Image: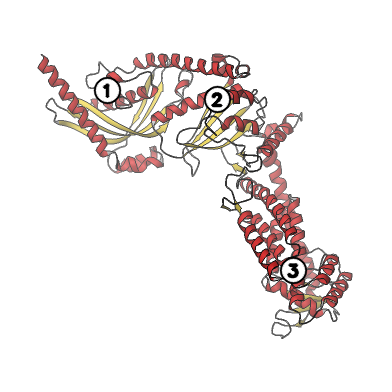
Amino acid sequence: MDVIFSKILSMSFSAVFVIAGVLLLRLLLKKAPRKYSYFLWLLVFFRLLCPITIESPVSLIPVKEDAILFQSGDAGGRVKIDTGIGALDTLIVRGSAKLVETKEGSPLPELVSKGHSNLTTVLFARAGILWGLGMLGFMAYGVIQVLRLRYRLRTATLVSGRDAEDCPIPIYESDYIQTAFLLGLLRPRIYLPLGTGQERSYVIAHEGMHRRRLDHIVKPLCYLAVVLHWFNPLVWLAFSLMNKDMEMSCDEQVLKHAKEDIRSDYSKCLLKLSAMESGLSVPLAFGETNTKERIRHALKYKKPSVWIGIGAILVLFIASVTLLTTSGKGGWLGGDSGVMGAWNKPLSKEEFYRFLSENRNPYIGDASANGRLLGILPGLSCYAYDGTQLQTSHEPYELIIRYKKTEPISVREEMENADTMMRNAMYLFATIENMGRCTFSLVEDQEAEQHEASYSLYREEMEQIYGPLYERSKTPEGLLQLEEDYQAYQKELEEFLKSTAMSKIDLYDTEYSLVEGAQGAPEEQQNLNDPADMVEALISEAILDYGADSWASGHQVEAHAILGGEYALFQQLIQSDRDMVFYLLVRAAAFGDEGEEAGGSRFPARITISRDDNGGLFVKEFWVPRDGAYYDDDIKAEFPEEYWDDALTMEGYKEALEEAVLSKITERLAEDNADDTGK
């Protein structure tokens, strides 16, 4: 229900602009036949009923297709608001936040669970139920009206059948109705009041025109759209004007096909029927309405010129292309309120710090201000921005920034992303005064939105290191000094990580270890200040340890390729219990003094790296699949689906792994020969 309601809201919001466009175009078509205006309204109702739109660069709709999106989750779900109109997003967020915060004793805060925004509570805890009840009520009203009318018509008398020459559809008369109409979907029938006189032929011609144009099917569908969007007053206006244009276009067709000028007699017919009109509202029947305007229109009718018809057709074509499509990104009316995920334009350091300082935001609920700040912060490698959510029902107030993975990511890129998230969070704390927590939500599986990892940083923890952050952003110079303090702290942290990691990684005293660095550099050139190098060293050591018992004699070498993985922020390892999980392909081998291979294997593996109580890195788990019939099942149970093919076949990796192992064996033999010659 919540997902459907959010889609209806998005469709209704987009339709507002379509209706506005049709109202303007309707003025341009004032002198054209009303059938063109009627067609324009059909575009509106198609947009209200069709949940899918086509993207087009010429679209005039300024909002995104899923401007309001409900995303289900373990906590009950959350709402993503990203209309593409910054001012409107801000108004929605501020209004929903004040609705909760300003009403003491309100039950709304209790309905907001962790990870939800106030809008989730306001729109979907209450409005969704109200929408459903209203929809059922209006649908029931329409059905009841039709049933009442059919009950009145139970004694209607057939006066002309389908085979009659004067009319192709059945005609009935009844003394329980006071106006003429067409009723029925699959088998439409014309119903006339008993005693209809000379105006009978005009009524039959008018209702027959409805039948030929399938209006008896179109109107119920349009009423269905009204039922779904009953909360939108512009939809009701569109339905009313559509009915008016539908009836007038039918009048025009009757006058056009008449063999003589019948405008006067036809107008008298309309006047007479209006005098007998009962006022009964039947959404699925075609009763006569808007009599005064129709009479005035009929008396003024004259056949349009060819040029008016050509111009009207051109307007319809342009309207179809620009109003039935979406721009995909939205934003021409007020700009994109979301994060761009990359630099909007190249900025110097001075411009960057000046922009942040001048756009400080004292209130986290100002979505537009948040968007301006996020828009100039760098994005994440291999991830695309996917919107933001706010939690302002209780402290700490939280900004959640969502990303979806777009391509495989290397370990080094993951390390760079970790630094980017830490740095971006620091700048956001410094420029959004009442934000207490900043969460980065990374989704690995774009289809099912699974394998989601969330990393939260807190203002309190950062201010223990850098002091009052919002105060430091008063001037660009203050932000520049904050950046220098950040870099200094990272150097201190790297030194600490180096010292603790060395207690766990003994690269030089291990007899069989020939570990290469993350960039393929020899041992002596490894930079253990680099977290990526430390991870590579740990992985290599774990692989060699894994094969040590199997190969009691000889020397061992290994090569591996990391497919990807989930990682903890290295900068938080001292304070966090989070593990790093990597999925890799391995080629390990043992060789004798003459270079002959004494054993070896090629296999996929999953390795988990954690830290001990002293902050030292260590291998927590080293997993490999079982051989034989269980091999494929183990891989599919333990590896993400995106890595299955590579793990099962190693295609594209076999040759590189073999060459790396051979190169290490050759280097080791060369070193041994050099040592023997020296002796």
Q: Residues within 10 Å of mark 2 (few under 14, many from 20)?
A: many
Secondary element under disc 3, as helix, strand or loop, is helix
Where is mark 1, residue-wise? 522
Of the residues tagged 3 and 1, which is closer to the observer? 3
N-terminal label among 2 and 3: 3
Residue 124, horizontal then vertical, whole percent: 67, 41
The residue depicted at 38 percent of the width and 13 percent of the height is 499
Q: Position of residue 353 (x, y in %)?
A: 57, 23
Snapshot quadrant of residue 671: top left
Asked whether the residues under the numbered discs 3 and 1 touch, taking CB atoms below 8 Å apart as contact, a structural biologist would say no
| Extreme residue toward the front, this view | 307
Q: For this view, does 583 lie left or right of residue 291?
A: left
Mark 2 against mark 3, which lies toward the viewer? Answer: 3
Kind of residue sitting beneath label 3: Ser
Indicate the secondary structure of the residue bearing disc 2. Answer: helix
Q: Residues within 10 Å of mark 1 (few under 14, many from 20)?
A: few
Residue ID at (75%, 32%): 106
Real-space Cα separation, disc 2 to disc 3, in angstroms: 61 Å
Q: Amino acid at mark 1?
A: Pro
Which residue corresponds to mark 3?
Answer: 249
Calculate the distance from the C-alpha at mark 3 to the C-alpha at mark 1.
84 Å
Q: Is residue 610 left or right of residue 466?
A: left
**Three-letter amino acid code at disc 2?**
Ala
**Dot 1: element:** loop
Instruction: Pinpoint residue 171: horizontal percent, then vertical percent.
Output: 76, 79
Q: Mark 1 and mark 2: span between their CA atoms?
A: 36 Å
